[in-house]
Amino acid sequence: MKGLVPLLKKISRKRILVVGDVMLDHYIWGDATRISPEAPVPVVDIARDSWSGGGAANVALNIASLGAQCTVAGFFGEDEAGAKLTEILAAHGISTLRTPGEAPTIVKTRVLVQRQQLCRLDREAAPPAYELTPARAEALLAAEIKRCDAVILSDYAKGLLTEELVKRLTKLARAAGKFIALDPKPKRKIAFQHLDLITPNKREALQLAGMEPVPHAPFPAREVCARLHEIYATKFLVITLGEEGMLLSANGKILKTIPTAAREVYDVSGAGDTSLAGLVLALVAGADLEEAAHFANAAAGVVVGKIGTATVTPDELTRYVNHG
């Protein structure tokens, strides 16, 4: 990838605001060599625990890891998990804006045995009633939007991003001349329009377009891209295709599909967060869509070679690209 070092230098001067569903990722690492006498399940001997940011917090961690400044706005519960998540973000230089509401911090616990995930345990309440009215959102986020270069809306369908909030944030970003991107979750049926970038996966793109998947049929890329532009009027559309790479579209027209950059895949957890962070950073740093996609693709290629929710540094990315 040409121009990587100058691009990384430009990225280091950018500031991004991430708004969305933050969560704490907890990993239990151990081994299992026997079956429980109480039930036909493995007994896990725990060796260690580790924690990282998940959801919108992982997007923020990837932005910081790639050298940019970042603020993340989301719901942090008044509990041990909320304090732990805030501490992790602060350790990476990420400032936090806590949105009002009453609910526990979302925690995803993964049990890994010999580097393989045995199970996942989720701690979360029913979607909480967040108290982030449009007026409160403006008071909380307007100043930060003016300070940043881009706004990323990271929706994990946990209830923070409502239709009204997305409209208000889009209006604020547009008024301030800022780039705005959304990683959507179609099952929430949030209406949005006139964003700079959306990054659905293949299944989400079909849902957004109101189309049903047809078994064994090729992905109807041209029709999906045209429909999404007609409905949402988004400037850039990047559809992540998993092992098939990324489909790039601008103003409803297909530009091209770029292949995946992954060489070894150990864990795809959080790879979409890395792609989103890389795309937005590269675009606001002056790259065109194809250059930004190659940058994001390479960053995700590094991350999927790691176990657990992970990030990528400029040094790791440079080594990865130069040894391609």
Image (cartoon, grey):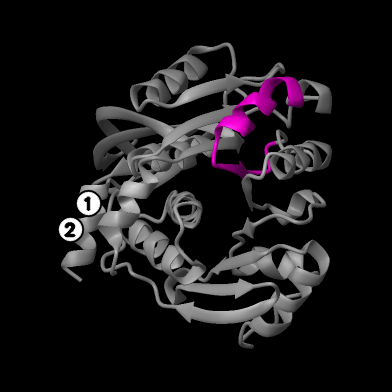
Q: Could you say which disc has been placed on residue 316 in the image?
A: 1
Q: Is residue 246 above or below residue 204?
A: below
Looking at the image, do the residues carrying marks 2 and 1 touch, with CB atoms under 8 Å apart? yes
Residue named by callout 2: 319
State which region is magenta: 138-158
Residue 88 on the magenta segment: no
Q: Residue at x 35, y 57 (%)?
A: 299
Q: Quadrant of residue 4?
A: bottom left
Instruction: Identify which amino acid the numbered label 2 is placed on.
Output: Arg
| Left or right, 210 with reference to 280 | right
Q: Quadrant of residue 139?
A: top right
Q: Is residue 278 above or below residue 206?
A: above
Residue 142 on the magenta segment: yes
Q: Residue 32: horizontal and vertical position, in percent?
A: 26, 41
Q: Residue 224: horizontal and vertical position, in percent?
A: 71, 76
Q: Residue 76: horizontal and vertical position, in percent?
A: 58, 20
Q: Quadrant of residue 206?
A: bottom right
Q: Residue at x 73, y 82 (%)?
A: 223
Q: Could you say which disc has been placed on residue 91 in the image?
A: none
Between residue 300 and residue 78, name the one nearer to us: 300
| Left or right, 296 with reference to 157 | left
Between residue 266 and residue 224, name the one nearer to us: 224
